[in-house]
Amino acid sequence: MPRFADQTALITGGTGGLGESHVRAYHAEGANVVIGSTTGGLSKATELATELGERALAVHLDVTSEDDWAAAVAATEQTFGALTILVNNAGVQNSAVTIDATDQARWDRTFAINVTGQFLGIKTVAPAMRRAGGGSIVNIGSTMAYGGTALYASYVASKWATRGLTLSAALELGRDNIRVNTIHPGVISTKLIHEPAAPGERPISDFYDPKPFAIPRLGAPTDVSAALLYLTSPEASFATGTELVLDGGLLLGPALPVGVAEAA
């Protein structure tokens, strides 16, 4: 039997580099997949659902809208029955700017998508998971939630907030058989990393050379998807409030060059 047979996963931001990888991973493992996307990406979400065929549904989902969340959950339950997995994947990176030059609208937009979107997802999906007898929620954070990064204060602050939200939700929902965990990816090879956040800016990949990492490469979306499948599987039934850092050793600091350890 497929690993996620009879499970239904709702993935927000389901057409981005990470989101599409997650959608494909769950579908390949037998799950029903609901691909959440805003109006701008809905045609791509529909194309992806059509490509996958049965067990796939595209829904319009602006994660900052409680009404959109309610409609997405209703469509999921109507189409597939129980909703058992939520991946709060949708997120936005702010363009590089100092704090004193950050306008409030830019700050508010980052928090609306990265924090309020996850809050609304948990709030709306929790009752559906109770009806299903339990479930698993994973919030996608960032290694930026473990330090400060100049010029990205709104993004950094939003990812720190994700950590607190996850831990509180894990405590509130554990007795309902709902587990809540976080994955904090490092530098993953997606458009978010390789393309500028605003015209004229350098992409984030310009600032991260993976050669000093203990695992000297950028991460792949499938690395994150594999960790996600584990955290939402029965094998992780004792894990809640877990913060899984997936960064190839970025936060550890520079690794020893090849050959140095042998020569010591």
Image (cartoon, grey):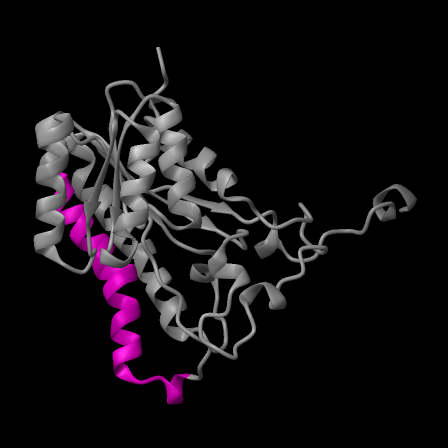
- Please state the horizontal and vertical placement of residue 217, each as a whole percent of the image: 66, 49
Identify whether 226 is placed above or below 30. Answer: below
Nearest the eye: 76 or 163: 76
Residue, far right: 263
Q: Is residue 88 visible in the rendered structure shown here?
A: no
Nearest the eye: 134 or 7: 7
- Please state the horizontal and vertical placement of residue 142, each as a whole percent of the image: 43, 56
Residue, far top: 1
Task: Tell me which segment is drawn in magenta.
Answer: 99-126
The stretch drawn in magenta includes residue 201: no
The stretch drawn in magenta includes residue 125: yes
Instruction: Locate residue 172 relative to residue 29 in the image: left or right.
Output: left
Task: Tell me which residue sits at (60%, 47%) in the image.
Answer: 248
- Please state the horizontal and vertical placement of residue 193, each as a whole percent of the image: 52, 60
Q: Quadrant of the N terminus?
A: top left
Instruction: Locate residue 49 relative to residue 71 in the image: left or right.
Output: right
Res. 133 image quadrant: top left
